[in-house]
Structures are given as C-alpha cells and as structure tokens.
Amino acid sequence: MNFLSGLAPIAHWGVRLSLAATFIYHGLGKWPPTGFAEALGLPLAIAWAVMIAEVLAGLFLMIGAFGKDVLTRLAGLIVIVIMIGAIALVHAANGFSVSNGGFEFQLLMLTVGLYFAARGNNV
C-alpha cells in the first residue's frame, strides 16, 4: 500500500492527460466543422463552438496543471457541457453500452469533468 500511497500526488496526470488528449483529438477531428454540423443537424456556429471548446478544454487541462487552477476548473465545466450535449443529442438513444453507441464513455468523461471542475488542482 505504501507504493500506491506514493503515487497519489501524481495519479491525476493519467486522468488529466487522457481526458485532455481525448478532447483535443475529437475537437481537431471535427475540422472542418461543416461535416460535423451537417451530420448532427446543428447550426454551423454551434459546430464551430463545440470544436473550439473541445480543443480548449484539452489545452486548459494541460496548462492548468501547472498552477492555473481556474483553467483546470474551466476545462472541467467545458467537458461537462460538451458531454451533456453529446449524451442528449447522440448517445442516449442508443442506451448505456458503448458497443451499441451508447453513453457509457461520455458519462465517464462527464464525471471526470465534474471532478476537475469541483477539485481544480486540489487532486
């Protein structure tokens, strides 16, 4: 158990970096946002906002780790909003299981976003 306790101060890095990488990857994957907008029937302005917000959330999670608590918390809030939208607009209709296109993964990211919004850098 001493080994695991010793990991506690750095354990946030795995969660932080994997969420940041996922959001940056998916945000950049929406370029150009016209296809994303058309696929979901969204106004182009909303598609742009989602794309930019996803990239910024990932960047804020990484930059925030170096002392900018407000960036970490803001990233968490962005993740929450984006994941609520993703669940409501796309994944809820498919049930829970990710193998059926469900919201299992999005719910996990939403709760991690909630963690970072609530705790900031106090991890």
Image: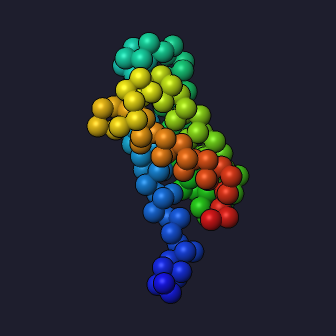
Residue at 55% over, 47% down? 111
Placement of 56 over or under 93, stated as above or below: below
68 or 83, nearer to the observer: 83
Placement of 39 over or under 53, stated as above or below: above
One can see residue 31 in this view: no
Q: Position of residue 47 (x, y in %)?
A: 49, 22
Q: Quadrant of residue 97?
A: top left
96 or 76, nearer to the observer: 96
Quarter of the C terminus within the rendering: bottom right
In the rendered view, how is the structure colored?
Answer: rainbow
Residue at 54% over, 42% down? 110
Marker count (numbered): 0
76 or 106, nearer to the observer: 106
Placement of 123 over or under 33, stated as above or below: below
Residue at 52% over, 72% down? 10
Residue at 68% over, 52% down? 118
Q: Position of residue 91 (x, y in %)?
A: 42, 28
One can see residue 62 in this view: yes
- Residue 120 vs residue 79: left or right? right
- Residue 54 vs residue 29: left or right? right
User: Which residue is outermost to the bottom?
Assistant: 2
Q: Quadrant of residue 122?
A: bottom right
37 or 2, nearer to the observer: 2
Q: Position of residue 104 (x, y in %)?
A: 42, 40
Q: Position of residue 32 (x, y in %)?
A: 39, 25
